[in-house]
Image (cartoon, rainbow, N blue to C red):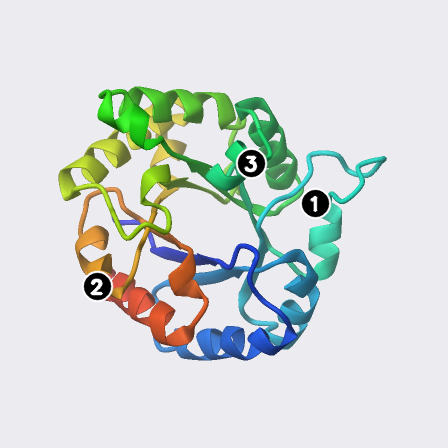
Amino acid sequence: MALRKLVAGNWKMHGLSADLAEAKAIAEQSKDYPGVDVALCVPSILIERAARALPDFTIGAQDVHHAEKGAHTGCISVQMLHDAGASLTIVGHSERREAQRESDEEVKSKATAALSCGLAVILCVGESLEVRERGAAVETVVGQLDGSLPHVLSSETELAIAYEPIWAIGTGKIPTVDEIAEMHSAIRQRLRERFGADGDQVRILYGGSVKASNAVEIFAIADVDGALVGGASLKATDFIPIVAAAASSSGG
């Protein structure tokens, strides 16, 4: 049975109070596609305002700290995100793995902390162009997944994996259909090996220059259960057609 599609927008370091109008437009227009789960991961300064303005829409964060509290200047805990109104967080995005030098172990600790406190998680993995060109993409991503996954999943856990080829993020380039299918199949197989039947319930999203013009083709690939969308999630006119493509692919 196909999993319900999830289309999540990652606003990255974009968004001020005035941009909440776009979030409202996205939330309102998403109601036309009730068979798709839609979310926006906004900058931390907007989480509370967005959640307050859109009480029936999923607002997420872009990162979280693994500790409950403490001397972690500039960091945000799971409890703080809950308090602000977030119900989802991204962990392990390639831009944090690279710029903030986050390790697999750090990503795992963040995912574990969030899931254990009832916050849904989108855990990101992906390879560089150099890794792809030397034929080690699958090996590298599966290894990254192994190091980043929490040890245990409960039946209530809401975990999604986002495969993001680093070289495709914001470039307009995407892997071929066969390359995406190969990677998503490898991720699914590893999830089954780690979690048994529960591994089939973990959604695998594709991320990396997803837009209206390629969304239909991407969503038609086996084990593509949604998308993590960057730049195209900033405007309803760009984002909603992707949601519509997800709905079309799943009959909803």
Q: Nearer the viewer, mark 3 or mark 1?
A: 3
Give how far apart the Cα atoms at labels 3 and 2 are: 30 Å
Instruction: Using residue 206 as the reference point, say whether residue 149 is left or right of it.
Output: right
> Callout 1: few (<14), some (14-19), or many (20+) C-alpha neighbours within 10 Å?
many
Q: Position of residue 160 (x, y in %)?
A: 44, 43
- Kind of residue indicated by mark 2: Ser
**Relative to the observer, which residue lies in front, 1 or 88?**
88
Q: Rounded to the nearest whole Å, what is the CA distance between mark 1 and mark 2?
A: 36 Å
Q: Which mark is residue 78?
A: 1
Residue situated furthest right in the rendering: 71
Q: Earlier in the sequence, mark 1 or mark 2?
A: 1
Q: Which residue is mark 3?
A: 99
Label number found at residue 100: none
Residue 12 in view of the camera = yes
Disc 1 marks which amino acid? Val
Q: Residue at x 27, y 46 (%)?
A: 224
Residue type, numbered disc 3 = Ala
Residue bearing mark 2:
213
Give me the C-alpha separation between circle 3 and circle 1. Answer: 22 Å
Q: Nearer the viewer, mark 3 or mark 2?
A: 3
